[in-house]
Amino acid sequence: MQNTEPPTTHDPAGQRTAQQPDTGRRARRRAGLRGTSLGICMMLIAQLILGVGVNLYVHVPAADQGHGLGTALGRALTSPPATLAARAALGTLLLVAAVNVLARALRARHKLAIAASVTGLAAIAGAAVSGASFVSDRRAGASMAMAVLTGVALLSTWATCSWCPRARPQPARAVGMAEPIVLTPIGVVRGGRSQIYEDHWGAVVSRLVLDPAALDRSATDGLSEFSHIEVVFHFHRETRVRRNATHPRGNPAWPQVGVLAGHSPVRPNHLGVSVCALLEVAGLELTVRGLDAIDGTPILDIKPYAAEFQPTGPVREPPWMRELMARYY
């Protein structure tokens, strides 16, 4: 999921900014969009079941045929058979609900959900027209078109539901814990990989394009004297949060470890830290190799890698970590 939040700044006292309420409001809107989409999915499944019943067992009265689409829809809503009336009523409710979902997607500013909602609304409208044509003229193919369009609407609405994360209750904060903070990206990763792969990052070359609104051009002066840099970034496509223990990469051959004993992106703040080779410094654009972050990743900070900051004594790590990292770079 791309991070579309606008950048914000902290006040001098370091207090929370206006973006936090806006972020929470947007999360609630997306949760509401998910709930509404899930309800429409249930209605569409019922519509498909009713459609099978209409096609197999319902005879459309002759009085309901040959009067045009509008009249056919009205008679289907108000006249027997009951199955046909129920399907027409449900189709009308689906049209209203699909408009509601599109409005929610627009308010939530979720581009993928907007596209899926438009597709779903168009499919539901097309299914309604096909259904009215089936009642009015028993036109060949109208019933099949209605079923196909209802299926398209179901897939589109389910996609909207899947793309909007479920609202999760936040645990109560312990007494004495720090207040939430807001971080502003200083740049973005460009190039390299566009999809997430677990291994073989060593040869990946990408660019770190820094934001001139966040940094002066002199911010990178002297950085070229270092062979490597440390990059702090945000796993912007990850929405899941894990606070407990699990098998690394889901591999049952490795022991269960807590989220703080691994490097999984499924973690409370979705932060990543990586050491990579610095190939070139050109003002506010750095070329690096071996950065395990995909195109579009927000950059939160960059520091030069210095051997003096590394541990002075022996480093201990479990065997499963060595196995996991054997093909990582």
Image (cartoon, rainbow, N blue to C red):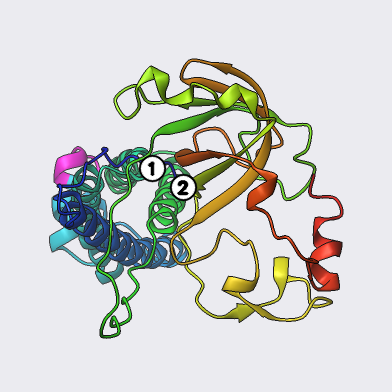
Q: Locate residue 173, reporting x and y percent.
A: 29, 80
- Considering depth in this image, is 115 or 199 the residue closer to the camera? 199
Which quadrant of the view contains residue 223? top right
Q: Quadrant of the C terminus?
A: top right
Amino acid type shown at disc 1: Asn
Determine which of the numbered discs, if any, sits on residue 236 in the image. Answer: 2
Q: Which residues are magenta?
A: 65-71
Q: Which residue is mark 1?
A: 3
Q: Locate residue 288, reporting x and y percent.
A: 65, 28
- For the point 58% across and 73% down, which residue is it? 259
- For the point 16% across and 59% down, which residue is it? 77
Please tell me which of labels 1 and 2 falls first in the chain: 1
Whether residue 67 appears in magenta in the rendering, the answer is yes
Measured along the vertical axis of the image, is residue 258 above or below residue 91?
below
Element under disc 1: loop
The reply to whether the C-beta atoms of the residues labelled 1 and 2 are less than 8 Å apart is yes
- For the point 35% across and 73% down, which residue is it? 168
